Amino acid sequence: MSKYIIIEGTDNVGKDTQQDLIIKKLSDTVFHKLHYSSLPFKDASGYYDKEKHATYSTELYESMFLLMMKSKLGHKVGDIDINLIFNRAHLGETVYSPLYRGYSGDYVFNIEKKYTKALREELYLITLVNDPHTILKRDDGKSFYGNEEEVKAEVDGFRRAHRLSTIKNKLLVNVGTMNADEVSNIIIDFLNNQNTITGENKQLNLFK
């Protein structure tokens, strides 16, 4: 069965590292690495073209889910599984657009809802968070935020996005003082769980 893994979170929480550790530790599974970064729709003064950004992002994330669906539906017995791992994806739009671009990115939840039922076995969401002070100390100067209050707003935004996501298999990790391997062990245990449409008998008979 294919795996489609989305890793979300603010800058400087270890997304790149965890993406690589997943590939290293699940080496029997060949992944295509995808990295969604900021779109280049700013004018000369640094202001976003909101309409262009929103229109482009809508098509981008719609086609992202279609890529997964076409991979799933086109798979035949005996075919090699196509596995995708995304470093950032659609949920960042719900965080960064209201904070820095002046419009709501919650439309991505409507896109997501169209596909999560069909992808409920294959699709995983991993959201990494940390306390704002630690994130700010690790800043490399390339992030949107400029102070601890803005970092907190981003962390709160990703917690909210994770909570509202309809992806069935999801894991929120508060990195805290854990090292990369400790975080990775939590993630690998989560990914190794068997996800099936129907529950086990003990679950199905729970209310009888």
Image (spheres, helix red, strand yellow):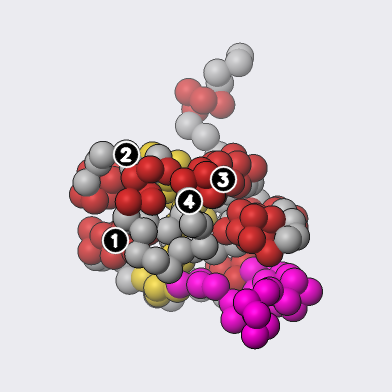
Kindly identify the residue that appears in the image at 59 percent across and 77 percent down: 39
Residue position for label 3: 153
| Magenta segment boundaries in residue numbering | 35-62
> Residue 62: which quarter of the image?
bottom right
> Residue 90: which quarter of the image?
bottom right
Residues tagged 3 and 1 counted as in contact (Cβ below 8 A): no
Query: In front: mark 3 or mark 2?
Result: 3
Q: Secondary structure at mark 4?
A: loop
187 sits to left or right of 1 = left
Percent x, y for residue 153? 56, 45
Kindly identify the residue that appears in the image at 68 percent across and 74 percent down: 48
Residue position for label 4: 147
Does 78 appear above or below 172?
A: below
Under mark 1, the amino acid is Thr
Kindly identify the residue that appears in the image at 38 percent across and 43 percent down: 133
Residue position for label 2: 176
Quarter of the image with the N terminus is bottom left
Kindly identify the residue that appears in the image at 69 percent across and 55 percent down: 98
Give the spatial CA distance, label 4 vs label 2.
Answer: 19 Å
Under mark 3, the amino acid is Ala
Residue position for label 1: 17
Residues tagged 2 and 1 counted as in contact (Cβ below 8 A): no
Query: In front: mark 1 or mark 4?
Result: 4
Q: Earlier in the sequence, mark 1 or mark 4?
A: 1
Q: Earlier in the sequence, mark 3 or mark 1?
A: 1
* Crowd rating for badge 3 (residues with CA inside 10 Å; few <14, some 14–19, many 20+): some
* Crowd rating for badge 1 (residues with CA inside 10 Å; few <14, some 14–19, many 20+): few
Give the spatial CA distance, label 2 vs label 1.
Answer: 15 Å
Query: In front: mark 4 or mark 2?
Result: 4
Q: Residue furthest right?
A: 51
Q: Which mark is residue 80?
A: none
Q: Earlier in the sequence, mark 4 or mark 2?
A: 4
